[in-house]
Image (cartoon, rainbow, N blue to C red):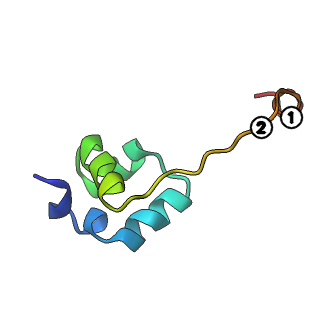
Amino acid sequence: MIWYDYPELRDKETLLWMLRKGMTREEIAEVVGCPVSAVRTAELRHTLKKPVIIMSDELRQKLKL
């Protein structure tokens, strides 16, 4: 099946909600019942990107990451 065969991936708002909730691609794929590649393709087709957080080494050490 192709990414747009899954209603949850075809609907941009639903996919965006899952990403904002902090779900990984693997978790989304498991919930939807599709391959991870379908989730990745849906993100690309909807032009969705996960937020990138840039932090200093000092902050990283304070957070112990």
Q: Amino acid at mark 1?
A: Leu
Disc 2, SS? loop
Q: In the displayed structure, does residue 5 sit left or right of residue 60? A: left
In space, the residues marked 1 and 2 are separated at their CA atoms by 6 Å
Q: Residue at x 31, y 71 (%)?
A: 11
| Image-based side of 31 in relation to 49, left or right | left
Residue 17 x/y as whole percent: 48, 67
In this rendering, does residue 31 appear at all? no
> Is residue 19 in sight in this rendering?
yes
Residue at the extreme left of the image, as rendered: 1
- Image disc number at residue 55: 2
In the image: residue 54, left or right of residue 13: right
Q: Residue at x 47, y 52 (%)?
A: 49
Crowd band around label 2 with a 10 angstrom C-alpha radius: few (<14), some (14–19), many (20+)? few
Q: Nearer the viewer, residue 49 or 24?
A: 49
Q: Which mark is residue 32?
A: none
Res. 12 image quadrant? bottom left
Side (left or right) of 59 relative to 2: right
Going by the numbered disc 2, the residue's amino acid type is: Met
Q: Dots 1 and 2: beta carbons under 8 Å?
A: yes
- The image position of residue 26, as x and y in percent, is 38, 42
Which residue, given by chain and number where applicable, does mark 1 sit on? 59
Q: Nearer the viewer, residue 53 or 30?
A: 53
Residue beneath the point at 39% across and 59% down: 47
Residue 50: give x, y in percent of width and height: 52, 50
Label 1 neighbour load within 10 Å: few <14, some 14-19, many 20+: few
On the rendered image, what quadrant is the C terminus found in? top right
Q: Circle 1 — which element?
A: helix
